[in-house]
Amino acid sequence: MERTKALEIVKKQLTEHRFIHTLGVEETSLALAEKYGVDPKKAETAAIFHDYAKFRPKEEMRDIVRSEGLSQELLYYGNEVLHAPVGAFLVEKEVGITDRDVLSAIYYHTTGQGAMTELEKVIFLADYIEPNRQFPGVENVREMAENDLDQACLMAVKNTITFLMKQNQKIYPLTFEAYNGLLQEIKLKNKKECTG
Ligand SMILES: Nc1ncnc2c1ncn2[C@@H]1O[C@H](COP(=O)(O)OP(=O)(O)O)[C@@H](O)[C@H]1O
């Protein structure tokens, strides 16, 4: 889909603040995609639509989880985790985007998952570090993103888990799977480098 058209569609779904965040995610995704050899058009589309469902009423999101065969486990964690999988569903249904890579990058952009694709990592990380994000530790993740996609994603995952634990909030388990998967990938990469 043409960029201007995609932005026009998504703008109607978002507040001004969230639209500016989306443009930041797009910019950062494109930079990461170029650096790490990810398809820039897929990154652009996933970034533009990643928060498509952010402002859907909670009950609508819960109904979609119940009726459309999404993981029922989603219903037992905070509402934050709903907008990403529900967004992937609605972007396909309402906007007509069918690219599975793009849809899964939207689906996993909040939690990550066990074996993340490079596109999923790019969108997950861009959402975390885009220029409008300001929270303690974000600068360290931005610096790491310059050099190592997996390490930067791992930092973001660890920060998120720590943050949620400090708040006494339940943690949707896919984020633990993302932690394990990224660590495993990093270890394998290091081993390969050592053995040449
Ligand atoms: N595994 C998880 N379980 C519960 N909440 C989570 C999990 N992962 C992320 N979150 C929460 O989701 C929120 C961020 O969602 P995100 O999709 O990054 O936001 P945004 O919609 O602003 O892009 C944060 O409050 C974060 O702590």
Image (tube, grey):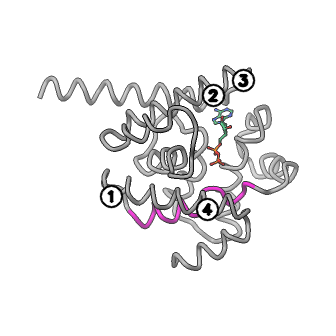
x 45%, y 31%: residue:
154
**Label 3 sits on what residue type?**
Gln
User: What residue is pinned by disc 4?
Assistant: 20
Pair 3/2: label in front: 3
Residue visible at 66% across and 74% down?
A: 9
The picture places residue 54, in percent across and down from the top left corner, at 72, 54
Q: Position of residue 170 (x, y in %)?
A: 73, 25
Residue depicted at x 80% and y 52%: 64
The mark nearer the N terminus, 4 or 2, is 4
The type of residue carrying mark 1 is Glu
- 190 shown above or below 6: above
Disc 4 crowd rating (10 Å Cα; few below 14, some 14-19, many 20+) is some
Q: Which residue is mark 1?
A: 34
Q: Find out whether the residues at labels 3 and 2 contact each other: C-beta distance under 8 Å.
A: no
Give the mark nearest the N terminus, 1 or 2: 1
Which sits in the foreground, 187 or 71? 187
